[in-house]
Image: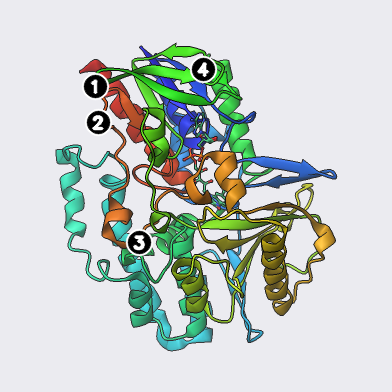
Amino acid sequence: MKAVVIGGGLGGLAAALRLKARGWDVAVCEANPTLGGKMNRWSRDGLVFDTGPSLITMPHVFRELYEALGERMDDHVSFVRVHPFAEYRFGSGARVVCPAGMDEWRSVVREIEPGDVRGIDRLHEIGRKVYELSARTFFRRSPFSPPSWRELPALRFLPLRGAWGNYARTVEQHVRNPLLRMIYHRYATYVGSSPYCCPATLLVIPYIEQAFGAWHARGGLYSIVESLTRLAAARGVELRTSARVVAIERNRKRATGVLVDDATRIAADAVIMNGDSETMPELVGGKAAIDPASRSMSGVVLLCRRTELPLRAHHTVVFSDNYSAEFEQLMGCRAFPNDPTVYISAPRVSEPSASTGVFVMANAPATAEDWGARELDVAIAGVSRRLRAGGIVLDRADVLDVWYPGRFAQSYFAPFGSIYGANSHGWRNAFFRTPNRSRELRGLYFVGGSSHPGGGTPTVLLSARITADLVDRDARA
Ligand SMILES: Cc1cc2nc3c(=O)[nH]c(=O)nc-3n(C[C@H](O)[C@H](O)[C@H](O)COP(=O)(O)OP(=O)(O)OC[C@H]3O[C@@H](n4cnc5c(N)ncnc54)[C@H](O)[C@@H]3O)c2cc1C
């Protein structure tokens, strides 16, 4: 049996490897010259940068992938626990260091606002229940697949009291302190969404971070892509880079292969779309109609030379003075905020010997507007102003490379430059993402952040497991 994967992002590589391990003949077609998609790397002046993810959660999901391939993860990549998780800086001059470990975090919360300890516990309890339910259901199978009897015990986590409301309102109901509220609100941005618009089920994110830790990979997160690429090549997965798929070929209601931009045709029993699922209509002769308001956020990323910035943690967040106004601009006006919250990842803090640069990021709207030099200057000035307010001086000359919505859109075929596919605003978007098996064309499947169960590296690996299982099961039915 032959499968062709459109896109060599993390999800595409993982699905390809899983199918190969089950005896499939697999080809991966990636439009870019490098594999990894949004999980990528860039270097300049002897410094190496991860240009995409900087934080890994749920390391067991990565471990399970290697085990499914008959490998030990530790033989391929070296995960390092990030401790503390982050230092949060506020306009008032306040600083909060968030340690790994719930007891340690409770002690910090007690010092800030003793009355909020119970509320924080309650938020994590909601997150735990969502996780327990999802781990056995949502994270394991495609929506619309019939549930198995093994999932029944997980249903005891229903009804999830407190999980059905609005995320920000739920946080505010349980937590009084404004700094703690901001810290919890920010977790919704891990999936490119606004805390003011998404459901409280996303409290699973802070729960997951505390329960399973935050992780980095020695040598950078791109080492994960490198190791998967090495495994794929060694096992005979055909890896075609600079190979853009321009059409999915079909025979009546069945996908039969792909046409690559160099006019090569690859016939296949299964076609797996790892690119954004909403661009798929373009590959079958239609036109994609995507509403920018339905997309997750994009970002402005500055890759910086300065390695001696006064940072005490691997991750630093400098909050804007008005978080809700920031999201009003991002979501309501689809504009880059005047006062953005800025995130810094400085892997050198955990790995001093590494030649890694500093990654600086602010949320940006998913937008089709082309940013010119003026828009970039305005964004960089806003980021620098906020950093300076947090005690961090970043010289423009230290900015070696800049990413913005249009560049994300172009580089990864990501509509409006959004990073996590559709946003998680409201129930439909949060729970009903593109199913892993097409309902229009037999033999067509979806994998990755724009499809079920969603974006972010561990979720994308869960998507690869679900999709590879479906492809293999359908072929054997
Ligand atoms: C700046 C940034 C920061 C992030 N931070 C984090 C983080 O800290 N933690 C975390 O877990 N996640 C983070 N993410 C998200 C994470 O990187 C993604 O969710 C994940 O890597 C997506 O993988 P994927 O397989 O879905 O697809 P993608 O990485 O989107 O790959 C899809 C690939 O398909 C290719 N493609 C599309 N159409 C075609 C076509 N027609 N023909 C051929 N190829 C095609 C594209 O070129 C692309 O390479 C971040 C992402 C970015 C950009």
Residue 189 x %, y %: 48, 62
Q: Quadrant of the N terminus?
A: top left
Q: Is mark 3 within 8 Å of ligand 1?
A: no
Picture disc at residue 440: 2
Pointer 1 with pointer 2, Cβ within 8 A: yes
C-alpha separation, residue under disc 1 versus residue under disc 2: 7 Å
Q: Dot 1: few (<14), some (14–19), or many (≥20) neighbours within 10 Å?
A: few
Give the residue type that dot 4 points to. Val
Q: Nearer the viewer, mark 2 or mark 3?
A: 2
Earlier sequence position, callout 1 versus callout 2:
1
Q: Secondary structure at mark 3?
A: loop
- Judging depth in this view, the residue of 375 and 257 nearest the camera is 375
Earlier sequence position, callout 4 versus callout 3:
4
Give the residue type that dot 2 points to. Glu
Q: Secondary structure at mark 2?
A: loop
Q: Please name the residue that numbered disc 4 is placed on.
A: 237
Q: Dot 4: few (<14), some (14–19), or many (≥20) neighbours within 10 Å?
A: many
Give the residue type that dot 3 points to. His
Q: Please name the residue that numbered disc 3 is placed on.
A: 425
Q: Please name the residue that numbered disc 1 is placed on.
A: 253
Picture disc at residue 448: none
Q: Residue at x 42, y 38 (%)?
A: 279
Q: Is mark 4 within 8 Å of ligand 1?
A: no
C-alpha separation, residue under disc 2 versus residue under disc 3: 25 Å
Residue 374 x %, y %: 71, 62
C-alpha separation, residue under disc 4 versus residue under disc 1: 27 Å
Pointer 4 with pointer 2, Cβ within 8 A: no
Pointer 4 with pointer 1, Cβ within 8 A: no
Earlier sequence position, callout 2 versus callout 3:
3
In the rendered image, the vertical position of residue 49 relative to residue 125, given as above or below: above
The quarter of the displayed image where residue 232 is located: top right
Q: Is residue 216 visible?
A: no
